Image (cartoon, grey):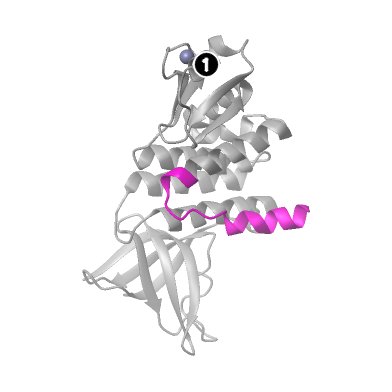
Amino acid sequence: MITKTDGFVLKSMRYRDTSKIVTFYTRRFGKIKGIAKGARGMKSKFGAALEPLSLISMVLYKKEHRELQFISQCDLVRTYRSIETDLEKMAVGMSILELLNRTTHDEEENALLFETVRTLFEVLESTQKNPMNLLYGFQLRLGTIFGFGVSLEACSVCGRSLESLVGDSFVWFQAGKGALLCESCADGHEVGSATRKISVATAQILSRFHSARIESLSSIQLDQRTGNEVDETLRSYMRYHFEGWKPLKSLEVLQRVHG
Ligand SMILES: [Zn+2]
């Protein structure tokens, strides 16, 4: 059938002399792969619509259980100038798409996930500060969308609230359960290998990244030390839940530039 949907380009590679094979994350069909014939020709009708970091609208001949769909038309719906021209924003945008590609299976529609990414891109485009916060917020939302969301309001054993733990220096984050253990409960417990000791301040920031609206994520301020701890904690959370986890390539580029 001939059909139409919006999507983000996740990956694009050359195919034969003039074509491209492109992976999209679409609103209606989730992740799909398609072939765009003639996409690399001088007068290609696809123009710049097959590059990552833009929202596109496509027409495709869709066949069930076919690995490669035939893309007949692709138009830009939204370009993100600020993301394309700011190195840190670009790294965050590419990381979001990389995560999306790695954590989804072909043809599993998920309107909430699509809408989450679209909103993240709008906010990333307009934000003046803390673009990394959007990537942190996205990782926590991925957990919720895929059914292993965190619960960071209180110790999972004794129920003491995170707020009342401010006098303590540390809590333990259990990547498997996405839950917290206070110091006294961690004492008598088998904490397990996928458990990290983190500062209460970091737990509070993680909790805010989890519950804040996407529009408010970049106004959350954190110092470098907390930022590093948030980063490491989320990495261990992702590693626990997604098999064969590897560090994000899009972030390595940024880290190399920053030395
Ligand atoms: Zn406790």
Q: Quadrant of the N terminus?
A: bottom left
Find residue 239 and report its horizontal and vertical position in percent.
49, 46
Q: Amino acid at mark 1?
A: Leu
Question: For this rendering, which residue is in front, 135 or 117?
Answer: 135
Find residue 154 and report its horizontal and vertical position in percent.
46, 17
- The picture quadrant where one finds residue 224 is top right
Local packing at callout 1 (Cα closer than 10 Å; few below 14, some 14-19, many 20+) is many
Rendered view: 35 above or below 173: below
Q: Which residues are magenta?
A: 239-259
Find residue 87 and report its horizontal and vertical position in percent.
69, 55
Q: Is residue 231 left or right of residue 77?
A: right
Residue underneath mark 1: 162
Find residue 42 and report its horizontal and vertical position in percent.
55, 86
- The picture quadrant where one finds residue 105 is bottom left
Tell me which residue sits at (78%, 53%) in the image. 259
Tell me which residue sits at (51%, 83%) in the image. 40
